[in-house]
Image: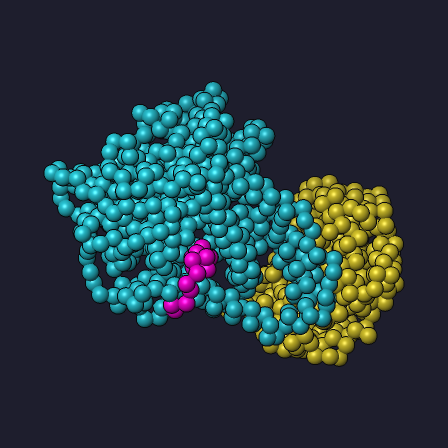
Amino acid sequence: MPEVELRNITKRFGKITAVEDINVKVKDKEYVTILGPSGCGKTTLVKVISGIWDATEGEVFIDGKRMEGIPTYERDLGYVFQNIALFPHLNVWDNVTYSPRVKDLEMEKLERIGNEMLDLLNLLKIKAFFPNELSGGMQQKTALGRALSTNAKLLLLDEPLSALDTRVRLELRYELRRLVKDLGLTAIHVTHDQEEAMSVSDRIVVMKKGRIVEIDSPENLYKHPKTLFTANFVGESNFIEGRIVKVDEEIGDVEIRNKLHITIRRNGFKRGDGVVLVVRPENLILQSEEAANSIEGVITKITFMGAYFRYHVKLKSDDTVMVDIPTIYKKRFNKNDKVMVVFRRENLLVYAKPYEGLMEVLKLE
Amino acid sequence: MKLTKKLSDLFAKRSARRGWNAFIIFFFALFVLLPTIYVLSYIVTDWGVISTDVLSDTNSVDLSWSEYTEADFLEYEVHKSTVSNFNLTETTLAFEIDNNKTTHTVLMGLSPSTIYYFKIGVNTSSRIIHSNEVNTTGYYETPPPSFEIILYEPIVTKTESLIYHCLWISFEIAAIVTIIDFIAGLPMAWMLVRKEFRGKRFFDTFLDMPLAVPTAALGFSTALFWAVTPGILSPPGSLNLLSSPMLLIIVLHIVFSYPYMVRSLAAILQEIDINYEIAGETCGASRLTAARTITLPLFRAGLVTGIILCFARSLSETGGTMVALATLGSMEKTGPVLIGTWKHVAKYNPNLVPALAFTSIVLILLALVLLVMVKIIVTKVKLPLKKVWPRPEKFLSKGLPPKLGNLFTFIFLLFIVLIPSFFIFSYVATAEPATEIGWGGFWSSLYYSFLVATIITVIDLALGIPMAILIVRGKSKKLGHVLDTLINVPLIVPTAALGFSLGLFWSTQFSFLSSPLLLIIFAHVAFTYPLVVRNVAGALEETDVVYEETARTLGAKPIQVFRKVMLPMIRPSILAGAIMAFTRSLGETGATLAVSPEAITAPVYIVRLIKDHQAYYQAGLACIILIAVSYCAMLLLRYITKKAR
């Protein structure tokens, strides 16, 4: 049963370090996503796992076995490529049965696997088509079939959906997760799309600049990100810098710019600590009337997003925050309206003000 | 500035552009395509002569004699008779030769059932000398020393079978060379494209080096390295291994065709996404299986280019082959060598023209048929791809076998290609210096070669780039396609046949134009023009038309689009095309010999030094000078094109 473990993996290309000191353990039948901005080294990781590249340092274990010196074709895995890479000179059937063929399985077995695979993916009708005759979605489905027909229990997906149209991408996402779970596979999926990561994975590995930032379930990552980087990269957030000026039994008082105040739940911070307050746009409330724990502001921009309106509000503290209000709410605001932005203490995440500065920490690269 | 503006306005007009395109096509048709295949018209117009002189059961005889060296020389007379002990008279005179260096000739149309007797007479200002008599019975007695001119043992062959024999040798050699090139070239291309290793850049440069060496020099150098030669031609390191002319020609042809094969294979390999192969490996295919079942089939179309380039190069090579054979002391001939030799003789004995025409026609037709066949075979015939042998292929994919393969490739490059190319340095460094013949002839031949190479490079660029644009960006896709196919014809036609055909065309159709220099230029344009067009067209196909469209939306006129947008993008290919054309012209022997025996270019001069004068040391030195000068020319060309930016 494939468990994948990376121990102290470092990969350098000349002077450039692509990934550094990576430690991850992927459990059997787990769907893990490696999420990060482009250039963070996530593709490098799957290439190292698959044996396409060798790690400069560290070790890869699949199923408890050390993989050093074992070439890709003996690692028993399926691999789906970002650019699909279907063999252009072979039709769908030959593509999907490539693996059984190169393993020299008997004809009946080969045909059984091929038919099962095409049936599973609903591709039987197009089995005689060549890749250039297929739509992007069909192509990637075929590529998935090709990877699955290896009969491997470990599936590596390198940005499998990013070459596809939005609509197809959404559909294939669910298809992917369904297949992995139905077939009881272990999947490692690389993506830069945080929505994709959240919708398919059991756990997400967030990466930045060749290092792991944090590993957690999608829900935890979204609700309680451990770092400012994750809070910014996974979902959207508002950031407000301030300083704790008073702490009592229940609440702390944070002074933000222009001597304005927001109160937070009491936590480990002491008086005088610099903090960053993080709040998701959907967790802010807009209203015209005065309210507790609110800051006054002016609406500078309104964008209709379908399910909700996004308001950009310039607060008196000179911070600009995004506020999302579901479309079904009757109350509408107009540009230049004076509004109160209400901060609810249970929705405020508080982080220590980073030493390098907020912008530096949020940077993707 | 004013002129460019005027030009730019002129070309903004559609009619002007049409006229220009028509001119380009006209030029290509009249100066390149038509002369190249003109000789084929001989089938229609002069078939009678060919069938009586060549195809009916007739013999030809090769005569050679000792040179008359006195200053009072006027001409040699070749006499033929059917009675023995004949006297030299008007009726026995076959033809005259007014050059005392020409001591070899061929007579044709001899009936096999008749015995012929031959004598050479020498006309001097004061007297007539005659040689011993030889005949076609096969009996030869060494003449007593009283003869001032000695006629050596004649070689009698059936004309038709001699032609077929030489052509067969050419095709056989070309096929073997192409196969070896492919087998040894594929791993090399693979290494260059798919592997990273220390010193790869040097490898890359070394590979092209033989291309800059004129083939006449390569022929001498390779023969010195491999062939069993007398002591003075065995410098330290010489292998003295090959005595078979066939094998020697094969190793020689590999030297200069190998880089072509590797380059074309590497170019295609570069295009093929490496992910296909990796995808294969993730499916459980070993490295070898993946390469064989995935990359190789994707290769096909491009494979044709490599095969045809190698085949055509080998088929048409003349100078190097002549030199190598002469160094070995062999009388064997390939098709182009036969054409070159006969053309030289035909200057005095016009009876050879039908045989020459026939040889050229067969060579051209076979080459064209072969081109089509290779294309069909490579694209249609299925390789055994479905079957897989997992175990042996897995074994060959890992550990020692691939390392051995790489080692073999490296050794091949070093010993088969590089060392033979430059072995001549070892010879010149160790040989006894000797200057039998003055250097004046060499310098003027060198000047001649450079003049021709420079002129044809300029012509090729000026008229080849527009042709490439017309092919790739022209309004009519069909016309582009047709031109694209036709442009390859001169590449396939062996240059000796091309030269003969071209010489025939210009001297019969436009005899006022047929000065040797002009003819040589026309001939060299014909076979180098496609090189420039191919290179530039290839680059144009690669560059997105969107840049030109953008420029046009910004208000650029056609000439401005060309100068400011297109030109900078395709500059490397223009340079590559120019270098290829220049070096090919500089190294060409076959076409030059076949067009006009009077034009002495540097390679022709070297061939003469070795063949006619056995002036080996001087030839060696001349080769080195030629190599050095062509290197400098290449660097200069590179420098100029860089500076033009």
Residue B541 image-quadrant placement: top right
Picture residue at 55% right of the left edge, 72% below the top: B404
State left or right for residue A209 relative to residue B129: right
Visible residue check, residue B524: no
**Chain B: colour as depicted:** cyan
Q: Does B240 lie within the magenta span? A: yes
Q: Quadrant of residue B581?
A: top left
Pinpoint residue A190: horizontal percent, then vertical percent.
71, 62
Magenta stretch in the rendered image = B239-255
Q: Residue furthest front?
A: B84
Q: Pinpoint residue B393: horizontal percent, then vertical percent.
A: 68, 68
Relative to B350, say whether A100 is above or below: below
In this view, the residue in front, A219 or A151, is A151
In the picture, which quadrant includes the C terminus of chain A? Answer: bottom right
| Rendering coords of residue B564 (x, y %) | 43, 37
At a point 22% along the width and 48% down the height, the residue shown is B149
Q: Quadrant of the N terminus of chain A?
A: bottom right
Identify the residue shown where x is 25% and y is 31%: B90
Q: Is residue A342 left or right of residue B225?
A: right
* Chain identifier, colour yellow: A
- Residue B91 seen in the figure: yes
- In the image, residue B492 above or below residue B291: above
Which quadrant of the structure image shows residue B621?
bottom left
Residue situated in front as seen by the camera: A121 or A331: A121
